[in-house]
Amino acid sequence: MSDFTGLVAIVTGGASGIGLATAKLLSSRGAQVAALDLKPEGLPDDILGVQADVSDDAQVQAAVAAVVERFGRLDVVVNNAGIGAVGDVTANSDEEWARVLDVNVIGMVRITRHAVPHLRRSPNAAIVNTCSIVAWAGVQQRALYSASKGAVYALTLAMAADHVREGIRVNCVAPGSADTPWIDRSLQHTADPVAARAALDAFQPTGRLVTADEVAGAIAYLASPLSTASVGTVLAVDNGMHGLRLRPPAQA
């Protein structure tokens, strides 16, 4: 027996990065897991892959229905699907603003909208949203992305207030710079990807990026029936990026 035994979980963006790490961890702890993704390929045999674009409400509705039909219930939703954006406030077109907000914010709304009727029937209902430390820490060249994650932070608190008395806990995790495929792709656009990665690592208080497994562990904690007093919580997983003010190494 484990803390997720008998529970059914949906993880969006579950075929790579933080989503895949979360899907694997929940499964290892007893959950039946469905990974919703644009390309749900190469998943372990114990994870159900379901194709779904969170920007398409009809696909989301069909995907949630398919998971409930397959497993008979729904207990946990991890709203993790998201896309990045780089640039200051002058850099991104209206179309890109609309696309990022549609995926990162309204995508969570779509999944949750169709999941809530099933979650209301669960004695261990939990929603965990993937936010980001940039929701409240100003980081250069992240205007659009930061705006989307600030909205996720506010949405999490509003959802928690709306659904706590229905027995549905809503929380979020706020990763710092995480070692994911998106970071790798971003670094490839720099003049020297190796040097850019070294500089990014050096910027972290611990000298390294957060791992996908570390974020997954935080998500699992908030989703678990063992954390029933955690409601409206924002759990930072950022290596101390926001809260610490360290001297340069030479002056320490």
Image (spheres, rainbow, N blue to C red):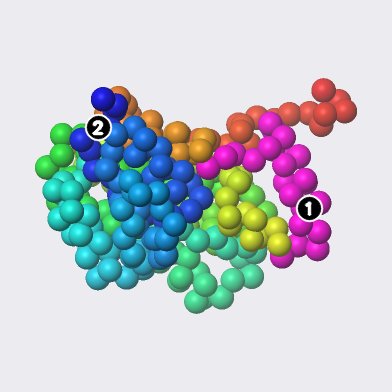
Residue 156 visible in this rendered orientation of the protein: no
Number of numbered discs visible in the structure rendering: 2
Distance from label 1 to label 2 (Cα)?
43 Å
Q: Which residue is drawn at 15% across and 34% down?
A: 123
Q: Residue 69, located in which quarter of the rendered image? A: bottom left
* Magenta stretch holds residue 199: yes
Element carrying mark 2:
loop
Under mark 2, the amino acid is: Thr
- Residue placed farthest to the right in the image? 250
- Labels 1 and 2 touching (C-beta < 8 A): no
Seen in the picture, residue 173 relative to 184 is either above or below; the reply is: above
Image quadrant for the C terminus?
Answer: top right
Q: How crowded is mark 1: few (under 14 residues within 10 Å), some or many (20 or more)?
A: few
Residue closest to the eye, 101 or 46: 46
Q: Residue at x 76, y 57 (%)?
A: 193
Res. 5 mark:
2
Q: Residues within 10 Å of mark 2 (few under 14, many from 20)?
A: some
Q: Which residue is drawn at 82% across and 29% down?
A: 249
Under mark 1, the amino acid is: Val
Seen in the picture, residue 64 relative to 166 is either above or below; the reply is: below
Residue closest to the eye, 11 or 160: 11
Image quadrant for the N terminus?
Answer: top left
Residue 70 screen position, x and y as percent: 18, 53
Seen in the picture, residue 72 relative to 218 is either above or below; the reply is: below
Residue 89 visible in this rendered orientation of the protein: yes
* Magenta stretch holds residue 140: no
Residue 72 screen position, x and y as percent: 13, 48
Residue range in magenta is: 189-212
Element carrying mark 1:
helix
Mark 1 or 2 closer to N-term? 2
Residue 214 screen position, x and y as percent: 52, 35
Residue at which label 1 appears: 194
